[in-house]
Image (cartoon, rainbow, N blue to C red):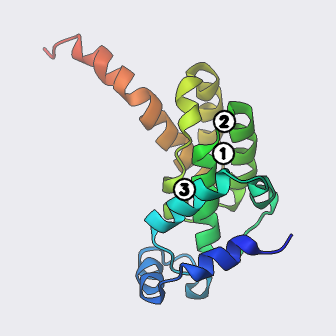
Amino acid sequence: MEKSYQKRLFELRDVEYASFQAKLTPTVPFELFIGVRVPKVRLLARELLKNPGYETFLEELPHKYYDENMLHGLLLSELKSYPECIALTDAFLPYVDNWAVCDIMSPKVLKKHKPELMEKIREWTASTETYTVRFGTEMLMLHFLDAVRLKASRYPQA
């Protein structure tokens, strides 16, 4: 496949922003930052989801650039099928190597599948991979913390 996604990201490049991002994510080599601002990556993800072919990008792992990983995470966040989202997330998590890419992933479809999601969260948090554990913990907090707070608020502190 032609690297059209890479080309699109480079068209949106902001060199100063790449320097800024590199300082926030020192574990990623500077030359792997294209420098696309997150709102622009979000718009690109929404645009790409409207056209066939984005699935190929999600299957081409690993990606070279940090910004490609950000795009990947945002595409996963917009998927409508729970089984597809889980399968593609599981395939991507071993390549997540920094907090920013991990934290940008927040698949909306997960909130409609809490019983199945809890099983996946247990699997993710039992991993030996740092960012898989982080993602599982984030999903646990996002989808289940309010239920714990609500239950706790029914019992006043002594």
Near-viewer residue (78 or 113):
78
**Which residue bears the numbered disc 2?**
123
| Element marked by disc 1 | loop
Name the mark nearer the viewer: 1 or 3.
Answer: 3
| Element marked by disc 3 | helix
Please give left or right for residue 150 compared with residue 78 in the image.
left
| Element marked by disc 2 | helix
Mark 2 touches mark 1? (CB < 8 Å): yes
Name the amino acid, label 2: Glu
Name the amino acid, label 1: Ser
Near-viewer residue (145 or 128):
145
Q: Residue at x 55, y 47 (%)?
A: 135
Q: Residue at x 59, y 24 (%)?
A: 113
**Which residue bears the numbered disc 3?**
102
Q: Establish if 15 lies above or below 57.
A: below
Q: Establish if 49 lies above or below 146.
A: below
Q: Residue at x 59, y 40 (%)?
A: 125
